[in-house]
Image: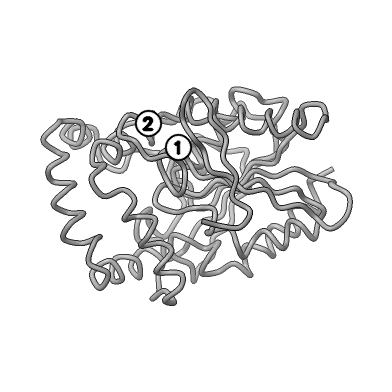
Amino acid sequence: MYPDSRYITIRGLQLHFRVVMPAGTVRHRVLLVASPGQSTHSWRNIVPELTEAGCQCVLCDLPGFGLSECRDDVPQDHETRAQFLWGLLDALDLETGSRLNCWHLMAHGSACGTIATMAMLQPDSAASLMMICPALYPPLPGPLMKLIARPGFRKLLGAFFRKYIVPIKKFEKIAAWVYGRPLATPQLTVLHDNMLRLEGHEELIQRMLVDGYRVDTARLNGLFMPAMVIWGGRDAILGSSVPMRLKGQDFKSAEYHVLAASGHCPVETNSRAVRDYLRGWIRELWV
C-alpha cells in the first residue's frame, strides 16, 4: 500500500491507481501502466522526470494485478482493459471539472498492447504512445498456445508457482534473469509481494497468457499519434533485438531505440537512459 493509493470501481471491479501532480501548472497528462506481475512501483524512477516537465501522472495497476482487485474471472483481453483505463481517465477528468483531455500513454511489456488498443478505441484522446519492451505477440507458437488454454494447464501453473515463485531464493534467480541483473532487496521484496498475490489464481494467469497477447497488430500502422518503442538489448524474454515483423511490417511508423545493456525492465534497471530518451521525446513532440 502506498500513502497516495486510490481506488475506483468500474463494472464491479476495483482498480488501484495513484496520481502524482507537478509542482506548477499541468502541461501534459500521462498514464503509466506496468505489465502483469509488476505494479505502480515500477515507475518510481520515471515519474520525477515527468512531473518536472509539468506532467500530471496517473499510475494504474492492470485489472487483476498489483493492488487492483485479483479474481480469477477478471477479463484479460486488451479491449476490456482499455475500456477500464479510459473509464478511469474520464472519471479523473470529470473529477477536476475539466473537459475530457488528451493523454500520453506509456506502458511496459504486454501492457503495451493495452495502450495500443486504447489508442485504437479513442485515437483523438491519445496524444502519444511510449512502449517499453512491448510484448505484442503470443509468447508461444499457435499449437502450444492451444495447450495453454486447456483446463489441465492450471495444475502445471500451480506447481510452477509453488516451486519457483513462492520460495524467495528461487524467485530471486528468476527475477535476476528477467531484469538482467540481481535486484536490491527492497526492489525484490516489492516484486515478490506482487507475485505472491497471484498464488492460487492459476485461472487468472492462464487467462492472461491466452488473452493478454491478442493485439490487433494490423491496425498499428493506422495510428497517427507519435509512438516510441524502447527495447532491451539483453532482454531474456523477448530477445535482444526488435522483431523485424514489428519494426518492418506491423508498426513501421514508430521510433525505435535499443538499450544495449538493459534486460526486460529498463524503467527500473536503466532508468537514466529511458529518461534521456523521454526528455528528448517531450521537448520535440509534445505540444
User: What residue is shown at x 44% (from left), y 56% (from top)?
Assistant: 241
The vertical placement of 48 against 62, above or below, is below
- Residue 13 position, x and y percent, is 46, 30
Gap between marks 2 and 1 measured at Cα: 7 Å
The vertical placement of 172 against 244, above or below, is below
- Residue 12 position, x and y percent, is 47, 25
Would residue 136 appear left or right of 92 to someone viewing this image? Answer: left
Instruction: Estimate how packed mark 1 is, as few (under 14), some (14 to 19) or many (20 or more) residues with alpha carbons within 10 Å.
Output: many
Residue 146 lies in what quarter of the image?
Answer: top left
Q: Which mark is residue 74?
A: 2
Would residue 193 appear left or right of 84 to someone viewing this image? Answer: left
Give the secondary structure at mark 2. Answer: loop
Count of marks, rendered view: 2
User: What residue is shown at x 25% (from left), y 60% (from top)?
Assistant: 165
Q: Nearer the viewer, residue 127 or 163?
A: 163
Instruction: Estimate how packed mark 2 is, as few (under 14), some (14 to 19) or many (20 or more) residues with alpha carbons within 10 Å.
Output: some
The vertical placement of 13 against 155, above or below, is above
- Where does label 1 land, which residue? 63
- Residue 237 position, x and y percent, is 35, 56
At label 2, which amino acid type do we have?
Val
Q: Nearer the viewer, residue 286 or 217?
A: 286
Give the secondary structure at mark 1. Answer: loop
Proximity of marks 2 and 1: CB atoms separated by less than 8 Å? yes
Would residue 173 appear left or right of 235 to someone viewing this image? Answer: left
- Residue 23 position, x and y percent, is 84, 58
Considering only order in the chain, which callout, 1 or 2, is on the residue closer to the N terminus?
Answer: 1
